[in-house]
Amino acid sequence: MIDEELLKILACPVCKTEVVLEGDRLVCVKCGLRYPIRDDIPVMLKEEAEPGPPPRKKGSA
Ligand SMILES: [Zn+2]
């Protein structure tokens, strides 16, 4: 599991925006790119990310 402190310092390398944990991947709240987590290590590489819709903020799901 990804540590919350680690989540705070991680950012999308494309738009420098925060990412949130969604299932087993990290999603940029701005551009929606999905970064995989391998062996508990977030892979913050644009080349590894999959495009998708930006996540909804808490409470709206
Ligand atoms: Zn982004």
Image: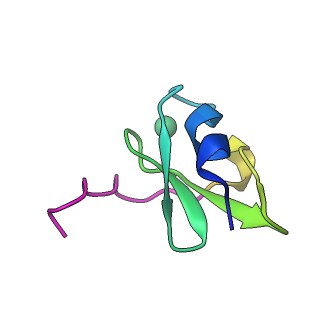
| 51 left or right, relative to 45 | left
Q: Can the viewer see residue 12 in this picture?
A: no
Q: Is residue 50 visible?
A: yes
**Splitting the image into 4 quarters, where does residue 40 fall?**
bottom right
Residue 4 in the image: above or below residue 36? above
User: x, y percentage for residue 51?
Assistant: 49, 56
| Near-viewer residue (5 or 20) | 5
Q: Quadrant of the C terminus?
A: bottom left
Q: Quadrant of residue 6?
A: top right
Q: How is the image coloured?
A: rainbow
Is residue 40 left or right of 34 when viewed as pictured?
right
Residue 33 in picture, x, y percent from top left: 51, 50
Q: Residue 11 location, x and y as percent?
A: 58, 34
Magenta stretch mostly in which secondary structure? loop
Q: Pick the residue in front: 42 or 54.
A: 42
Q: Is residue 52 magenta?
A: yes
Residue depicted at 72% across the width and 63% down the height? 37
Image coordinates for residue 36, horizontal then vertical, percent: 68, 62
Q: Residue furthest left?
A: 60
Region in magenta = 50-61
Residue 19 located within the stretch drawn in magenta:
no
Vertical side of 42 occupied by 9: above or below = above
Residue at image position (59%, 64%) is 25
Quadrant (top left, top right, bottom left, bottom right) of the N terminus: bottom right
Q: Residue lying farthest right?
A: 39
Residue 41 shown left or right of residue 55 in the figure: right
